[in-house]
Image (cartoon, rainbow, N blue to C red):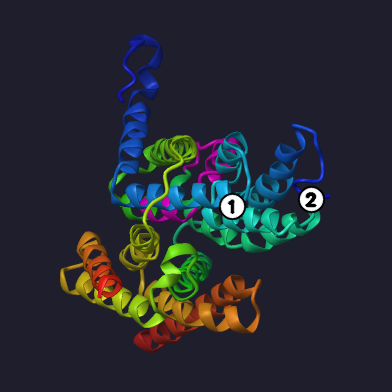
Amino acid sequence: MEGRSEPGQLQPDDRSFHWFGQGAGAAFSVPGLILVSAFVGFAGLAKDAGLTLLQTVFMTAVVWALPAKVVLVSTILSGGSLLTAAFAVTLSSVRLMPMVVAIMPEMRTAKTRQWVLYMLSHFVAVTSWVVALERFPEVPRPARTAFYGGLGTTLLVFNMIVVAAVFLLAARLPAPVSALLIFLTPMYFLTSLWGSAREMAGRLAMVFGLILGPVFHLWVPGLDLMLAGLIGGGSAYAVHLFVRRRQKA
Amino acid sequence: MSFDSSTSVWWPFVFILIAGWLATDVWRFLGVYLGARISEGSELLVLVRAIATALVAAVIAKLVLYPAGALASASVTLRIAAAAFGFGVYLMSGKRVIAGIIVAELVLLAGLIV
């Protein structure tokens, strides 16, 4: 994946191509494979909901985040209006904002152009976010946008192909196999999120989120993720501040 | 107007653009805008990262406790046991993601077969 076809012209970007390739390579990994299995499941859901191949592939490209797509398809399935669907998806996607805020300072340099960051932000979803935070320490800072671009583009295009393939093959997996496939996603998130936590606050936030997520789901469904994030993350940060102040004293 | 309420070929795509693309990318773009105003290593970023982490953790818990599709056929006890075993093995194996995932899957498989 090294873009050396037109040497003289591409000289300054030579290393960008290298890191774009590295990012693309990072898509073909355990997390990438798990995401593919999740998309196999999603394609089945969309097909059952009566969406066409083209509509589902289009949705994969423009929405990208899997939970948002599941919400969108469920709303379509229940005959919801455009307004209802837009509201439900908007609400369920608030979580993308803090994820983008957290990752942006890690990949920009003084020279990074804003539009590049806006383009790259479209690729932010749980898998690429976790993989990037895990791999960034070994990627030189000026190469991180190229790396993330390679990772995001590859994941997105590859899963568009997977979705189309599921539609064309019309294959249905036996129930225990799909159960195992669906279970891959939370297990991957659970382990890699713990591994990518930078400080004690991160691990604490994870424990709080695991507990508060289901609690708020029963209590205030719809706002559950946002509340679990704000309250769980906020209290983890409070504990982190408290501990550090005691260490200083 | 719902997804199926128009015979126009374009309507479903407009529907997906507004209720899907706009509804998600508005948050991503807002994140870029706000992220540009926070420097790496700042305390605020530790807080934001904690919030994002707790959010993703909440997604994980919901995927295990309130799963979609075929996973719902496994009992809640089995799902939690599989996740707990897998996570335990992950920690004991020196944070090997693949070890944790394989053990969790094996426990789930065993529970589904028995």
A125 relative to A80 in the view: left or right? left
Residue A187 falls in image quadrant: bottom left
Residue A82: within the magenta? no
A121 relative to A131 in the view: left or right? right
In the image, what residue type sits under mark 2? Ser
In the image, what residue type sits under mark 1? Lys
Mark 2: few, some, or many residues within 10 Å (few <14, many ≥20)? Answer: some
Residue underneath mark 1:
A69
Residue A23 falls in image quadrant: top left
Task: Indicate the chain on which mark 1 is placed.
Answer: A
Please, what secondary structure does the residue beneath circle 1 have?
helix
- Can see residue A124? no
Task: Indicate the chain on which mark 2 is placed.
Answer: B
Give me the residue at 64% from left, 58% from top.
Answer: A74
Q: Quadrant of the C terminus of chain A?
A: bottom left
Toward the viewer: A54 or A216? A54
Mark 1: few, some, or many residues within 10 Å (few <14, many ≥20)? Answer: many
Toward the viewer: B62 or A142? B62
Give the main secondary structure, helix, strand or loop, of the magenta stretch.
helix
Toward the viewer: A232 or B90? B90
In the rendering, at what x and y percent does residue B24 appear? 64, 51
Q: Quadrant of the N terminus of chain A?
A: top left
Give me the residue at 33% from left, 11% from top.
Answer: A7
> What segment carries the magenta color?
A109-131
Q: Give the vertical position of A119 relative to B85 (above or below).
A: above
Residue underneath mark 2:
B2
Residue A223 falls in image quadrant: bottom right
Number of the label disc, if any, that sits on residue A84: none
